[in-house]
Image (cartoon, coloured by chain):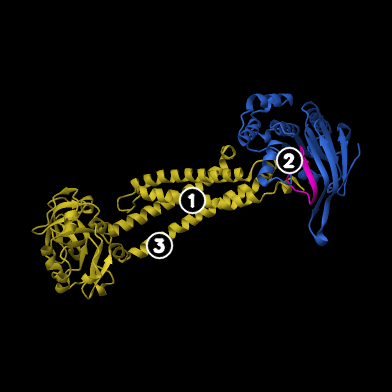
Amino acid sequence: MSNLIFESVTKVFGEGSSKYVALENINFKAESGQLILVVGPSGSGKTTFLTIAGGLQTPTEGDVKINDSTIKSLSEKQQTKLRLEKIGFVLQSYNLVPFLTVEEQFKLVDKLKKQNLTEQKMHELLSDLGLLELLKKYPNQLSGGQKQRVAIARALYTDPDYILADEPTAALDTDRSMKVIELLRDLAHKRNKIIIVVTHDLRLKNTADKVYQIIDGKMQMIN
Amino acid sequence: MFLAIKEMLHEKLRYSLIVVLIFLVSYLLIILTGLATGLANLNKAAINEWDASSIVLNSDSEGRLQQSFLSQDEVASLPNNGTRISQYSTLVKSENGLKENTQLVGLDSKSFIFKKLKITSGSKNIRNNAGVVSDKFKSDGFKIGDHLLVANSSLRIKITGFTPRATLSALPVVYISPDTIQPLNKGVTNAVVFKNKLKNSKIPKGTNQLSISSFIKKLPGYSAQQLTFDFMIAFLYIIILIVISIFLYILTVQKLPNLGVLKAQGVSTQYLILSTLFQSFIISVIGVIIAIILGEITAITLPSEVPIVIDKSNIIVTGIGIIIMSLLGALIPIRQIAKVDPYKIIGG
């Protein structure tokens, strides 16, 4: 069973008069099989939370643990490896490499991980997400919803312990947003993943297993 | 290098433009290097063929053969294994009206220089007003058995053989005997050339020993000409460096958000840097190969009056130089890649 734990995490930017507390004393725990929504207005600290969870930043105080191991103790190289192998990112934009076809997006992951899973696993994933016919398409030939589904498939391809999604529905209409979030929830439940979605879109809050709210750097569970 | 190759194949126009630019500058570089080598050879080819190490000239000659006059005593006090050189610049004409500016070089037929001379046709005979002449004469229409009429003199030199790579200060050489040149230069010995370097104790007062490379540098106009070419060539290398830097920098800046996301997704900075270096290497290799092919074709098609020499060593040095410049040009974009902070791209 995978887990992601924030222990009294505080993140401060700047010093003196320009000091800004982005996150304050956050305690948070996520376990496999959960879709967790983190909501809050712009500038509340959501993305800071996500980037710390993804090992892209280190907390000023406190600790972040993945499967009971502290991220802080890892070297930059180990953190890069961790992101490649344990974490899947789904972002609002620039998700896909523009000059690679859908199929090549997966091959890139293979090359980086020096693995050869490709065909069968890729086909299974794309088939599950209804994307099989898009294999030879470039990102600019896909709709917003298709791009996000491909990004989700790619994030899942390495079989990560958890997926971090930053505003994955921001560019989508309500119908497509609901489809993407339902897809994420199904993946969390069926594939036993931790999926954390950071969003300001409150329409999504009834779809998640847990909902946290961040306001002015302080986090509380609201659902 | 999957990412690098895929990007180049997808962005064919952008990368083709860089290849075209590298090709154009490389082509110019190869042509200039060829001209520099060709002109240098025109000045010094005969001296290189002598295969000597040093030359003794008059101290006041500033290393110039034409300005050097050695006395009989000075020549006599030098070791006798040297080749005495008498030189005279003049115009020669054939009986059927062909003209050629030339360097007459008087030397002994038993000297090591004469023994080393190669013959492309005819025989190696300089007795009785005969001469072995540069094969430039041959390409200009002179034939074995033709007589060269020396301007302002009654001397007639019979061509007995042609010798390759025999030009001195950009003029073709006519090798003749000391007796033949005597009426023209009053029997003056301009210099003595040695196969090996002499000990200073053996150099008589009033003379000066120069290495052959120093002597070549002092040939009239040689250093100025070569420095001019060196300057242009160095400048072209800098242009290649700047062109590659600017293009790769712009391309890198345009894809910074993607690079940031790739980093967030676990792609190492090292991988992204190697991709950029690989791209830089590939585009420069393609540009250089096209430039070499067209440079060779140009050298073949240019009229023989154009002194261009594109030899293997020049191509290797130029090619490696351009590729190194291209890799150096990738350093600025590499710095950008190393600095990309995925956190900032994601929007924290």
Residue most toward the right? A222
The disc at residue B135 is none
* Residue visible at 80% across and 37% down in the picture: A196
Q: Position of residue A125 (x, y in %)?
A: 71, 26
For mark 1, name the chain.
Answer: B
Q: Do tag 1 and tag 3 residues touch (Cβ < 8 Å)? A: no
* Residue visible at 78% across and 37% down in the picture: A168
Please give left or right for residue A99 compared with residue B81 in the image. right
Q: Position of residue A117 (x, y in %)?
A: 64, 28
The disc at residue A93 is 2
Quadrant containing the N terminus of chain B in the rendered view: top right
Closer to the camera: disc 2 or disc 1? 1
The residue under label 1 is B324
Crowd class of label 1 (few under 14; some 14 to 19; many from 20; radius 10 Å): some
Please give left or right for residue B32 compared with residue B81 in the image. right
* Residue visible at 65% across and 47% down in the picture: B254
Q: Position of residue B348 (x, y in %)?
A: 77, 48
Q: Nearer the viewer, residue A171 or B110?
A: B110
Q: Do tag 2 and tag 1 residues touch (Cβ < 8 Å)? A: no
Q: Do tag 3 and tag 2 residues touch (Cβ < 8 Å)? A: no
Residue B142 covered by magenta stretch: no
The residue under label 3 is B228
Magenta stretch bounds: A54-70
Chain B tint in image = yellow
Chain that is coloured blue in the picture = A
